[in-house]
Amino acid sequence: MKIEELRNLNNEELASKEKALKEELFKLNMQRYGGQVDKAHMFSLIKKDIARIKTVLRQKRENK
């Protein structure tokens, strides 16, 4: 997910997207501990997307 795409979303959309990504990360962790991870590279991608969303939310709060 690109940072420019995230900047065009409002706070509610960003929060819902963050929640969905956290749920997906939780599911991946459950698969990891069950020994059934097919896409191990997704951990880092999801974590980076969550960090980008948090950064955009913080920037929007500071600019108000």
Image (spheres, rainbow, N blue to C red):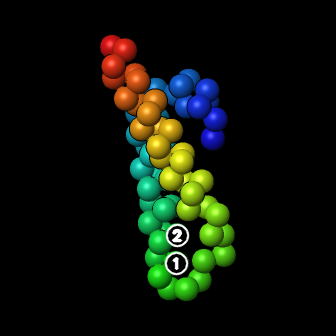
Which amino acid is tagged 2? Leu
Q: Quadrant of the N terminus?
A: top right
Residue at the (40%, 22%) spot, across then down: 60
Asked if marks 1 and 2 touch (Cβ < 8 Å), the reply is yes
Please tell me which residue is depicted at 40% across the width and 30% down the height of the picture: 57
| Above or below, 30 relative to 34 | above
Q: Position of residue 54 (x, y in %)?
A: 42, 38
Q: Locate residue 3, reporting x and y percent.
A: 59, 31
Residue located farthest toward the bottom when viewing the structure as drawn: 35
Choose top left, top right, bottom left or bottom right for residue 41: bottom right
Identify which residue is drawn at 59% across, 83% down. 36
Quarter of the image containing the C terminus?
top left
Snapshot quadrant of residue 6: top right
Residue identifier under label 2 = 28
Q: Nearer the viewer, residue 44 or 1?
A: 44
Does residue 10 lie above or below 49 as drawn?
above
Q: Residues within 10 Å of mark 2 (few under 14, many from 20)?
A: some
Amino acid carrying mark 1 in the image: Arg
Element under label 1?
helix
Other-residue count near label 1 (Cα within 10 Å), few / some / many at <14 / 14–19 / ≥20: some
Q: Answer above or below: position of 5 versus 26.
A: above
Q: Secondary structure at mark 2?
A: helix
Marks 1 and 2 sit apart, C-alpha to C-alpha, by 6 Å
The residue pinned by badge 1 equals 32
Pick whichever, 48 or 23, lies toward us: 48
